[in-house]
Amino acid sequence: MSPESIEGRLIAQRQILARLIHAHGDAMRGFLRDRSTVSIPEEDPSADGPDPAFAIEAALADEMRLILAAVERLD
């Protein structure tokens, strides 16, 4: 599957989620807001590059922000 196809599918899923969350109300928006930030750990100069777990956590928070933005555009 091409990167463009994957991105298109993710956008479609994000739009569907936004509509469901928009219909569900404030509880889901609060859930998204709470999870749309991530604490950046202190960098360890001796570490070999970024921590993969942090990269996943940052990507998750970014996706939560994108979904929340899509919900807010529906208002």
Image: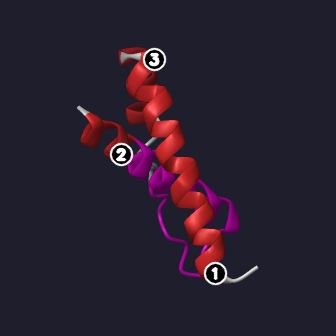
- Quadrant containing the C terminus is top left
Q: What residue is rendered at 64% in x and 81% in y?
A: 3
Q: Secondary structure at mark 2?
A: helix
Q: Are marks 2 and 1 in contact (CB under 8 Å)?
A: no
Q: Position of residue 15 (x, y in %)?
A: 47, 46
Q: Is residue 33 above or below residue 49?
A: above
Residue 61 position in % (x across, y down): 49, 50
Quarter of the image where one finds residue 7: bottom right
Q: From the viewer's side, name the closer residue of 9 and 36.
A: 9
Magenta stretch contains residue 58: yes
Tell me where the magenta segment starts and ends, as one range: 40-67
Q: Nearer the viewer, residue 34 or 1?
A: 1
Residue annotated with mark 3: 24
**Amino acid on which disc 1 is placed:** Pro
Labels 1 and 3: the sequence-earlier one = 1
Which of the two residues, 75 or 59, is positioned nearer the viewer here?
75
Q: Residue at x 44, y 45 (%)?
A: 67
Residue 58 visible, this angle: no
Residue 5 on image: x %, y %: 64, 75
> Which residue is rendered at x = 47% and y = 62% of the image?
42
- Left/right placement of residue 70 relative to residue 41 reads left
Disc 2 to disc 1, C-alpha distance: 21 Å
Q: Earlier in the sequence, mark 2 or mark 3?
A: 3
Q: Quadrant of the N terminus?
A: bottom right
Q: Is residue 27 left or right of residue 44?
A: left
Q: Residue 65 magenta-drawn?
A: yes
Residue at numbered disc 1:
3
Vertical relation: 18 (above or below) 57: above
Disc 2 designates what residue?
Answer: 70
Residue type, mark 2 in image: Ala
**Label 3 near label 1: C-beta < 8 Å?**
no
Q: Is residue 3 left or right of residue 40?
A: right
